[in-house]
Image: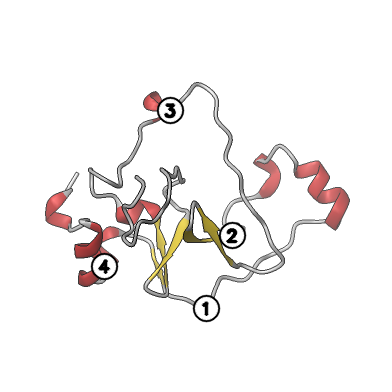
Amino acid sequence: SAGALGHGLPHNDLYLTADHGMILDDMVVNAGAMVNGDTIRFVPLSEMPSEFTYYHVETEHHDEILANGAASETFIDYVGRKGFDNYLEYLDLYGADRIIPEMKRLRVSAKRLLPPQLAQRLGAGLEQNAA
């Protein structure tokens, strides 16, 4: 939700896949690790619109960009590009898939790995949302 990351960020509600990373305290924190059931929640597919579009911004390197004002990672090739609508356009431009090296930042991929001060700030303690 807007403001869920602190300091008024993100400026507007932001929908992310669970594996997408936000940059917090100089770490890449997967959205799924931040779920607190209140301001950061898992939205079941049944509650999503029947059609929606995800945009994956790919840069030459795995970079930091702003998503609704909040620091976020650019596309990292953990999943193949073949599932994207513009895969053939990508091949026309670059000839083949390429590997994008991970950022040189610690990645927090699960709630149990959140540093205590960050978990507290996000309201994402294990005891608050054990489900």
Q: Is residue 15 left or right of residue 130?
A: right
Q: Residue furthest top?
A: 50
Q: Are marks 1 and 2 in contact (CB under 8 Å)?
A: no
> What residue is disc 3 on?
48
Give the numbered dot on residue 74: 2
Report how far apart the C-alphas of labels 4 and 1 lie in the structure.
19 Å
Q: Residue furthest bottom?
A: 104
Task: Label 1, secondary structure: give it.
Answer: loop
Give the numbered dot on residue 104: 1
Report how far apart the C-alphas of labels 3 and 1 lie in the structure.
34 Å
Using a 10 Å C-alpha cutoff, classify the residue at mark 1 as few (fewer than 14 neighbours), some (14 to 19) or many (20 or more). few
Using a 10 Å C-alpha cutoff, classify the residue at mark 3 as few (fewer than 14 neighbours), some (14 to 19) or many (20 or more). few
Task: Label 4, secondary structure: give it.
Answer: helix
Amino acid type of the residue tagged 2 in the rendering: Thr
Amino acid type of the residue tagged 1 in the rendering: Lys
> What residue is disc 4 on?
118
**Residue at 55% across / 73% down in the picture?**
103
Report how far apart the C-alphas of labels 1 and 2 lie in the structure.
13 Å
Instruction: Look at discs 1 and 2 and give the one toward the viewer.
Output: 2
